[in-house]
Image (spheres, rainbow, N blue to C red):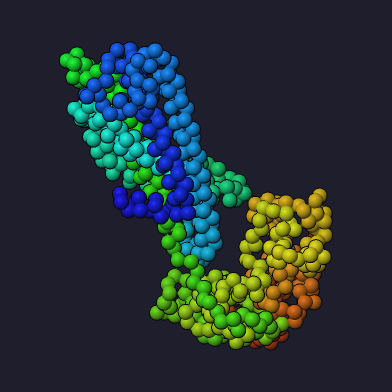
Amino acid sequence: MFSHFQLIWSLMRGHRLRYGLALACLLAATLLNYGVPLVGSVTIDFAVGDRTPGADTAAPMRGLLHLLGGPENLRANLWLAAVAMVLLSAVGGVFSYLKGWQASLASDGIARRLKEELYDHLNHLPARHHDRADTGDLVQRCTSDVETTRLFLASQVMDIGNAVILAGTALPLMLALHVPMTLVSFALLGPLVVYGYVYFRQVRHVFKQVDEAEGMLTGVVQENLTGIRVVRAFARHDHERAKFAVPNALYRDRALRMLRLMSWYWSVSDFVALGQLGLTLLVGAWWVATGEITVGVLFAFLAYLGIMLWPVRMMGRILTDLGKATVALTRIHEILHVGREPDPVAAPALTAAPLTGRIAVRDLHFHHAASDLPADGRGALNGVSFDVRPGETLAILGPSGAGKSTLMHLLLRLYDYRHGSIRLDDRELSALPRQWVRRQIGVVMQEPFLFSKSLRDNLRLGRGGAPDQEIEHAARAACIHDTILSFEHGYETVIGERGITLSGGQRQRVAIARAVLKAAPILILDDALSAVDAETETVILDALRSRRGKSTTLVIAHRLATLAHADRILVLEHGRIIQSGTHAELAAQDGLYRRLWQIQTSVETDFQNELLKN
């Protein structure tokens, strides 16, 4: 329990003054609200009851009588009691409003900071973490869990303070009125709080299960919506509905279990709370009949108990919400405690000079599953070595799983190598800051991703301040300029999520234009022309060849026609370079490249012959 409050206290940094002001307003409102029953008690005993204050009159009553001008003045002006009650209630209401305002400002500020920290942290987590993470669960933690925390900090924290302040201020006031009656009034409050704590300990793990089930449910929905076209294309509606029903039923069952436990708490706590009121009323009536206390004192005790009992009874719910909030905070901090991508602080000399685009790879080994290399030497890359001259176009070919994309990911420092070396202009890649390295490389991923923004904004992702003229020039180089102009709003056309309103080829060409616009020293095309037709591919390759010498270009492709005009071609298999040379050299050698070239040219020839026959 103490660790939970420590966690909440650390979360309040920067907003503790607001919470302090809220608690001060809460204390003021409580004292003013407690003054209302005291006015009623004094009026009943000394104005209506015609009693005179004596030595046995409690000090708070004597002080209030003095403020109201004494018993005689109060009897003659009963309206003073009404005015006093109204004023006390009104001013107390103002302080209650100020309390809620300050608490809301603080909680909203904390929630905003949490969301910003989470968003920033997720953008700096290692690629390995995102490879394993469930996107739906991450969304759940960044939205629902943060909202749970905000609600707790906005209301339940104040409710805890309210209960403590109510009990803390009521106890001395009630003791001053009548000690035995105070003991009777607090007889069942202790067991009620203990029961609430025990209940909290029992249901805390249930809240964790409910939260996890909701995260699973969110994950299924997110995955289904992302792949909605695949679901429809394969008529998998019934399968998806059945798949959704499993986490949905799990969430329902766990939520119902939580509600059953809560209903038990409310039933028992209601019984105890009403029992406390009944006990106070019965004992107080007996003591009024025997002259032990006055009617006004009994009225004050019942009023104080009515004010204090329900907030104290709510401690069980508050503790329950505390459990829910701590579960949410634990899930949030599980993300925040994941280490960010380590980024070295490079010497200024390493990043001062611009890159020319020279790349030197030596004995590079890499394995995705573990930091150590497998004993059988079958990693994603196994001793790769090659050089790329500034401005050279290097093509990389190989079957699926040969290590082509892994090599590109290492160049972008999405993963870190432990064995071997990659040097950019004689600077070791692992010693360079990640952000600086990524600014030096323009890349078109194997699966190009576009944002739900205008086409112009998507293109400017490559270089934010690029003028319109350069944007159009890059679009022409990627053969997408005319297509964009054919849209109703041209470059201001807003595309759907992930660029879904564009065809696959159009998405690839926009991604190529974005990379070209970046004008980086190194350009990587990772199977970037797979979705375009042969004619468009030829035009794009001609445009890229016209830029030859401006940047070092690495091209990954499966169609050998795409690679034929490269300065040099590397052939990878099982993470090793098995051939290297120009297209003419490799086509003349026995090996994988020649076999693939013969297969592809044979298929294309047969296809063209079939077209001619028809």
Residue 121 seen by the camera: yes
Which image quadrant: the C terminus? bottom right
Q: Is residue 597 above or below residue 223?
A: below
Residue 407 is situated, as x and y percent measured from the top left of the image, at 57, 75
Image height check: is 35 above or below 439? above
Give the residue drawn at x 62%, y 76%.
397
The image quarter in which residue 607 lies: bottom right
Up the image or down, 4 lies above or below 82; here it is below
Compared across the picture, whether 103 is left or right of 355 comes to left
Q: Residue furthest left?
A: 290
- 562 to the left or right of 574: right
Asked if residue 145 is positioned above or below residue 415 in the image, the reply reads above
Q: Quadrant of residue 42?
A: top left
The residue closer to the viewer here, 54 or 353, is: 54
Residue found 34% across the figure and 41% down from its top: 319
Q: Is 603 displayed left or right of 344 in the figure? A: right
Residue 591 occupies quadrant: bottom right
Front one among 389 and 592 = 389
Task: Estimate the x, y position of residue 351 in percent, counting from the top left.
Answer: 61, 80
Give whichever of 461, 360 is nearer the camera. Answer: 461
